[in-house]
Image (cartoon, grey):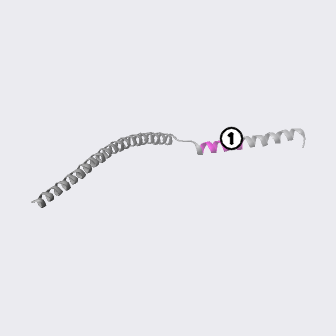
Amino acid sequence: MDRTELIVATAIILFIAFVLGWFSHWLVHRFTRVSKADLSEFERMSQELHEAEETRDQAITYLQQRESELTSQLAQTEAELRAAMEGVREARLEAEELRAYIEKISQGK
């Protein structure tokens, strides 16, 4: 094999390598290409996700406000209950005193 044949053989091998590389690149590009329909679908999904996140944030804010209101209402109700229980306790003591007074008067006659 002389020098010219070696150069031609090397050129053919390099050309075949180039063609195989180009073909493999074309195949990869062909199968991984994103179509316009896919892009519009991604855009729609992105918009829906954004709206869902906003709705979630609004729901969390509403629930926090409602929890705060209910906690406040519960504290107020508990305070009213304590006051009512104290009033009942005082009324019982007063009723006991009145019974004792009535019994004392009844026994005195």
Residue that appears at 23% across and 49% down: 87
Quarter in which the N terminus is drawn: top right
Say which amino acid is labelled 1.
Trp
| The magenta stretch spans residue 28 | yes
Residue topped by disc 1? 22
Name the side, left or right, on which 102 lies relative to 29.
left
Q: Quadrant of residue 72?
A: top left
Q: Locate residue 85, reporting x and y percent.
A: 26, 51
Q: Is residue 27 above or below residue 104?
A: above
Quarter in which the C terminus is drawn: bottom left
Q: Quadrant of residue 8?
A: top right
Does dot 1 land on a helix, a strand or a loop? helix
Q: Nearer the viewer, residue 11 or 87?
A: 87
Q: Residue furthest bottom?
A: 107
**Total count of labels:** 1
Q: Nearer the viewer, residue 80 or 101?
A: 101
Q: Quadrant of residue 70?
A: top left
First to last magenta residue range: 19-30
| The magenta stretch spans residue 63 | no
Q: Nearer the viewer, residue 63 or 18?
A: 63
Q: Locate residue 19, reporting x and y percent.
A: 71, 42
Q: Nearer the viewer, residue 71 or 24?
A: 71
Q: Dot 1: within a 10 Å radius of its alpha carbon, few (fewer than 14), some, or many (20 or more) residues?
A: few
Q: Locate residue 3, reporting x and y percent.
A: 89, 39
Name the side, left or right, on which 43 lies relative to 109.
right
Main SS of residues in magenta: helix
Residue that appears at 63% across and 44% down: 28
Residue that appears at 82% across and 41% down: 10
Q: Locate residue 79, reporting x and y percent.
A: 30, 45
